[in-house]
Image (tube, grey):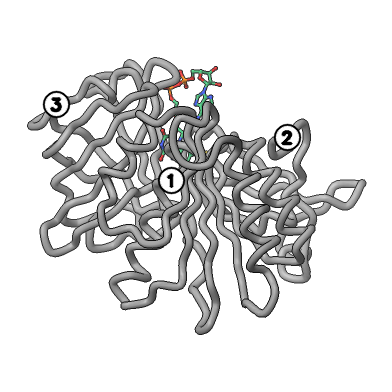
Amino acid sequence: MLKDYEVAVTKAQKLPGRMFFLEFEAPGLAKKCEPGEFVMLKVEPGTDPFLRRAFSVFYTEPKRGKLAILGKSYGFGTTRLREKKAGDRLKMAGPLGNRFGQAKKKETALLVAGGVGLAPLYFYQQVLAAERRKETYLFLGTRTKAEALALKRLMPQTVNLQIATDDGSYGYEGRVTDLLEKWLEKNRSGQVLRLLSCGPDPMMAKTVELAGKFDLPIEVSLETAMACGWGICIGCAVKSVPDEKTASEFPKTPDGFIFQRACVDGPVFNGHRVVWESDGPA
Ligand SMILES: Cc1cc2nc3c(=O)[nH]c(=O)nc-3n(C[C@H](O)[C@H](O)[C@H](O)COP(=O)(O)OP(=O)(O)OC[C@H]3O[C@@H](n4cnc5c(N)ncnc54)[C@H](O)[C@@H]3O)c2cc1C
Ligand code: FES
């Protein structure tokens, strides 16, 4: 159940490429959060900014009562968060949203992350690792070597990590989706594969296209702009093609689509059902 907690920053790091890492003492949430779920952070104690900001959970350590997020500063809220220091206290509501589907036996999950889109996918991989399951490959795309190494240092136990950098300064030179396509061309046959993706919209749209090409299921974690975060404002509508289940749950538009709320019906969606327009969800 959604609750509001007061949490304290225990570690704060500025990372290259305007990224940041924050770890919190948040024992209540650390016990509850599952991969794919998100939290809403109140950036400052007063009313400026008024709205909270959404963050996927990067990892939890329930025994130590820790919860971490990975961020990138774009505007007012995230720029303020990047300046937080150990000891700062914030309000954090959660857990919110749905989670990635459970991994099936004998299934290999291919996790495709762009930048801080890494957060929910790393959490997913950590949960599988704790269950002693290692059938995951993590494909991470960043712009530069400095960004790639900074993120790599935050996840020392990650297995099967493949990195692509846009400038070719580290790992594969080019887009992470090109790296994924090459991997699929070589390894697709004879394996039960599933794709999970989070990152910039054009990257997720391309990953969905590859899932179609290789006939694979795919879940995407959308970072649609949100106001309330718990289903009230309808500000986070995502246009999608209904399936058997959703067709009976949501009213259809005249042209046969449905609108779902990213905060309560997502943020994890079947990527094949999302209507991608101009390389992002409609
Ligand atoms: C479910 C969910 C999970 C999320 N998880 C994470 C996460 O793990 N890490 C993280 O860094 N962010 C995450 N986000 C995005 C994060 O919530 C936004 O970046 C943040 O709300 C922006 O707040 P701001 O005040 O800095 O920017 P605003 O002042 O609200 O926006 C400033 C400008 O930046 C643009 N902008 C804002 N956010 C983004 C973005 N993500 N990409 C591109 N342009 C953007 C806006 O369109 C606007 O033009 C998530 C969003 C959702 C809905
Ligand atoms: S953010 Fe308000 S309904 Fe989703």
Which of the two labelled residues, at mark 2 and mark 1, occupies the earlier sequence position?
1
Cα–Cα span, label 3 and label 1 = 22 Å
Q: Position of residue 223 (x, y in %)?
A: 53, 39
Give the vertical position of 207 relative to 109 (above or below): above
Quadrant where the N terminus sits is bottom left
Local secondary structure at mark 1: helix
Local secondary structure at mark 2: loop
Task: Look at label 1 and name its amino acid.
Answer: Leu
The residue that mark 3 highlights is 85
Which of the two labelled residues, at mark 3 and mark 1, occupies the earlier sequence position?
3
Within-10-Å neighbours for mark 1: few <14, some 14–19, many 20+: many
The residue that mark 2 highlights is 279
Of the pair 161 and 204, the residue shown nearer to us: 161
| Quadrant housing residue 10 | top left
Task: Look at label 3 and name its amino acid.
Answer: Lys
The residue that mark 1 highlights is 118
Within-10-Å neighbours for mark 3: few <14, some 14–19, many 20+: some
Within-10-Å neighbours for mark 2: few <14, some 14–19, many 20+: some
Say which residue appears at 63% left-offset and 77% top-offset: 191
Cα–Cα span, label 2 and label 1 = 19 Å
Q: Position of residue 211 (x, y in %)?
A: 71, 58
Cα–Cα span, label 2 and label 3 = 36 Å
Give the vertical position of 63 relative to 80 (above or below): below
